[in-house]
Amino acid sequence: MPSRSTRLIDWLRDWRPALLLGILTIGSYGLVLYGFGIIVGPIQDDEGWSSGATNAAFMGSYLLGAAASIISGRVLDSIGPRPVLLVGLIAGTALLAAASFADRVELFIPLWTLGGAITIAGLFYNVSMPITARLYPERQTAAMTVLVTTGGFSSVVFLPLTGLLTDELGWRWAVRILLALAAVLVIPALLTVRRLPPLPAATTSSHTRAQRPPTGFNNVRDALHSPEVLVMLAMVAVSSLALGALLNHFVPAATAAGLSLTAGGYLTGLRGFLSIPGRALIGPMAALLGLRPALGVGYAVMLLGTLALLAAGPLVWIYLSAVIAGLVWGQTMPLQGLIASDIFGLRRLGTLMALQTAVGNIALAVGPFAAGLLLDALNDNYQPVLAAVAAVNFVAVLLLISLARFRRKPTAAQPLP
């Protein structure tokens, strides 16, 4: 019987690419997503730039990154991962570093927008998920669990580190040091994941435009003629709209219900920490229930979390909402990615998953803005806003149920890694 150390070595050997892509995720998301929320206040205080102008760089990076992801997805499918990862690392890092030297907001916004967009397009889950799916075609659920559970440590590492460096050295040096750390975390995957394995041999069975051929759609146009793909994209858009609104408005809604700002910040950190065990549950849930029912449980629980916040009066409902959001937050995107891989097939998975990510990112950016407009119109009354978010969550559940109309060959449960 192999010893424990031998089994660990074998496990690390088997899952090394997925682990390295997860470590890449820690670095790529660390500053662009999590760190920016920490440095945005010090930037405004030190430079005297307005909140709107400073935050425009963040929103611009996500919107431009959504469009650039389509290009990186096509390159990934046609050439392979190396150019995508290399451009994401070099160009993204160079532009973000240049932004740390900008002395005018007119320079900071375009430099951060471009650097963030290239990082998003070249190093985020829209790239690492299709790479993982291609590397482990028969063990996608297990591989995705390794990827996202490892990547989930990004907020745990970068949130406190960004705060510490910014307090000690200022936001400019904090950005430069964090970029160097991110590069160290990205490079091992870049050196290891050089090419993708060939696609499985296609069968000779015929298919129509609205049906997925064995190895996937030949192009985006054919995919968009599939009702199943359209429902999938609509579901991702609706769920992302609700998720973005809930995540960004959680603390203001909780404080409006009576929670202190300090406690709200604590619960936000707890939510991020709980996303790690939430991601680790993806494998068991998918094996027990199947991918779509597992995602259905996630949507339903997120709806329950929104209703808990809506019912807040007793503070226990706010804590319940934070715990629920944390556990489910880390599951939604990976499960959507696994279902998308099943629907899209492997041939154009990079391009189509980039399209799905673009749709989700745009909705994620619009959700908080739309909720804010509704809040302004209702004189800062969060109850109708939360009711609207709950209604959008319910629509996501209905869209997932409608996917059951498209009968597919069931995927066998995959063992945990």
Image (spheres, rainbow, N blue to C red):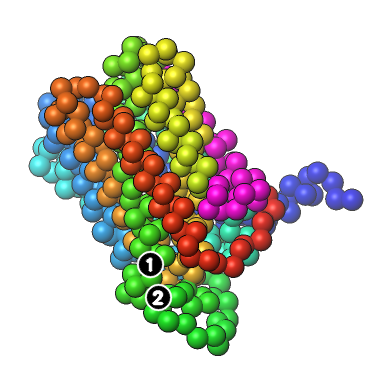
Q: Residue furthest right?
A: 1
- Viewer-proximal residue, 63 or 303? 303
Tell me which residue sits at (33%, 12%) in the image: 258
SS under mark 1? helix
As drawn, is 411 to the left or to the right of 211?
right
Residue 358, percent from left and from top: 31, 55
Residue 267, magenta (yes or no): yes
User: Which circle's residue, 1 or 2, is located before the other in the chain?
Assistant: 2
Residue 210, numbered label: 2
What is the magenta segment's predominant secondary structure?
Answer: helix
Q: Residues within 10 Å of mark 1 (few under 14, many from 20)?
A: some
Tell me which residue sits at (41%, 65%) in the image: 228
SS under mark 2? loop
Residue 226, percent from left and from top: 38, 70
Residue tagged 1: 227
- Viewer-proximal residue, 253 or 62? 253
Residue 344, percent from left and from top: 45, 67
Residue 180 appears in the picture as rendered: no
Task: Identify which amino acid the numbered label 1 is placed on.
Answer: Pro
Q: How many marks?
A: 2
Residue 103, above or below 316: below
Tell me which residue sits at (39%, 64%) in the image: 229
- Viewer-proximal residue, 84 or 126? 126
Task: Identify which amino acid the numbered label 2 is placed on.
Answer: Ala
Dot 1 and dot 2 residues touching (CB under 8 Å): yes
Residue 362 appears in the picture as rendered: yes
Residue 162, magenta (yes or no): no
Residue 348, percent from left and from top: 42, 71
As drawn, is 55 to the left or to the right of 360?
left
Residue segment shown in magenta? 265-294
Residue 8, above or below 343: above
